[in-house]
Image (cartoon, rainbow, N blue to C red):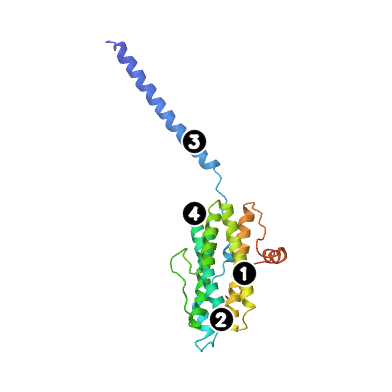
Amino acid sequence: MVKSPPYEKTLHECRQFSLMNTHALILTLIIVIFLAGCTSVPEPAGPDISGYLTPIDSENLARELGSAPAGTLTPTEEQDILFMQEEEKLARDVYAALYEKWQIPAFENIGGAEQTHMDSMTVLVDRYQLESSMQDTQGVFSNATLQSLYDDLVARGSASPEEALRVGALIEEVDLADLQEAMTRTDRQDILQVYENLAKGSRNHLRAFVQVMGQQGIAYTPQVLSPEEYQAIVSTAAERGRA
């Protein structure tokens, strides 16, 4: 019998050893992947705020108000309508900017409802044939006060996700306070109906932001509303009914 040269035997043993190592490596990878799948913990889902979203059907609103002449507004009523239309745009635009920055679903969801709030104000603008100077471009406002407020809020909300959520709650507080003041300056039922719908939306959206912050352990103190009014809102359930 012819014996293999020593170097051929060594080469054969090396190949067997390498093959065994490859199999062992593959088996190890399979075990690691399996264990990772078994032990991984899914990230907690965000709170369900769908019950707090308060969209307004502007087409239905326009039908309810009817096409009859609405009469002549006072200068204050006219100014309030045009201001509130742009203020609803501010809420929508800030939420869009902060969603783009942080990808927090609450901003996208509530921002969609804010679009319908802006549309409901447009119903009043059209009904009274007012000349609106509201800009279509996101983040651009005709009213200098609202432009400055938008710039400030986006800058504040861009500092951190926590600060962004605080900005969201602040916007709803400001909206609610401005609506309440505007309601004291008119006795027209069509205008009051729209304002009351928007106020309900602001209260619900404030509840939503506070719930999101609460799940993340973020304490929130009201910045515009009195502590009593704030507690009366966040301690009660979402408001239902037609909007």
Q: Is residue 193 visible?
A: yes
- Secondary structure beneath label 2: helix
- Secondary structure beneath label 3: helix
The amino acid marked with disc number 2 is Pro
User: Which mark is first along the chain, 4 or 3?
Assistant: 3
User: Which mark is first along the chain, 2 or 3?
Assistant: 3
Distance CA(mark 3)–CA(mark 4): 35 Å
Distance CA(mark 1)–CA(mark 3): 54 Å
The disc placed on residue 75 is: 2
Asked which quadrant contains residue 211, the reply is bottom right
Residue at which label 1 appears: 176
| Number of the front mark, 2 or 4 | 2
Q: For this rendering, which residue is in front, 100 or 134? A: 134
Mark 2: give few (<14), some (14-19) or many (20+) Cα within 10 Å. few
Quadrant of the snapshot with the C terminus: bottom right
**Residue 190, image x and y in percent?**
57, 82
Residue at which label 3 appears: 32
The amino acid marked with disc number 1 is Leu
**Residue 152, image x and y in percent?**
54, 58
Residue at which label 4 appears: 101
User: Which mark is first along the chain, 3 or 1?
Assistant: 3
Distance CA(mark 3)–CA(mark 2): 72 Å
User: Which mark is first along the chain, 4 or 2?
Assistant: 2
Query: Do the residues under discs 1 and 3 have CB atoms within 8 angstroms?
Result: no
- Secondary structure beneath label 1: helix
